[in-house]
Image (tube, grey):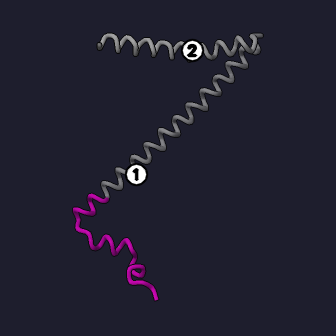
Amino acid sequence: MIHPLLSEGLFTTIFSDMNADLKFVLVISTIGCLTAIAIAVGVSAAKAWESVRRRETEAELMRDMLDQGKSAEEIERLLQSPTQSLKRSQRVTVGRSAASAG
């Protein structure tokens, strides 16, 4: 024997007992949650794509430098220097901001 809720359809039974205001709130909440999930998935995909493209660009740059005859140490130094100088400049900027605020 089938349960009466299952024979009529669970969602049909649940929604038939709700008033219009509650249905509206449920629909808006569902849309909000789905939007948040879509944004999170989109941001994650964009970050992954950015990472892949950055690695491809670095690999192409390394190939070009090797073709030019640069040594592995020189390539490593050139590839790491922008990252290290950026970190240093961020520390200096933060230090200046803290000094000017205090």
Q: Horizontal placement of 3 versus 17: left or right?
A: right
Residues shaded magenta: 1-26
Residue 25 occupies which quadrant of the picture? bottom left
Reading the chain from its start, which is encountered first: label 2 or label 1?
Answer: 1
Using a 10 Å C-alpha cutoff, classify the residue at mark 1 as few (fewer than 14 neighbours), some (14 to 19) or many (20 or more). Answer: few
**Residue tagged by mark 2?**
82
From this view, report whether residue 61 is shown above or below residue 27: above
Q: Horizontal placement of 40 versus 55: left or right?
A: left
Residue 4 occupies which quadrant of the picture? bottom left
Relative image position of residue 30 (x, y in whole percent): 35, 56
Q: Horizontal placement of 15 versus 65: left or right?
A: left
Residue 101 occupies which quadrant of the picture? top left
From this view, report whether residue 27 is shown above or below residue 75: below
Relative image position of residue 62 (x, y in whole percent): 70, 19
Q: Main secondary structure of the magenta part?
A: helix
Considering every residue shown, the one lying at the far bottom of the view is 1
From this view, report whether residue 78 is shown above or below residue 50: above
Residue at x-position 73% and y-position 19%: 63
The label on residue 34 is: 1
Residue at x-position 53% and y-position 39%: 45
Which amino acid, mark 2? Pro
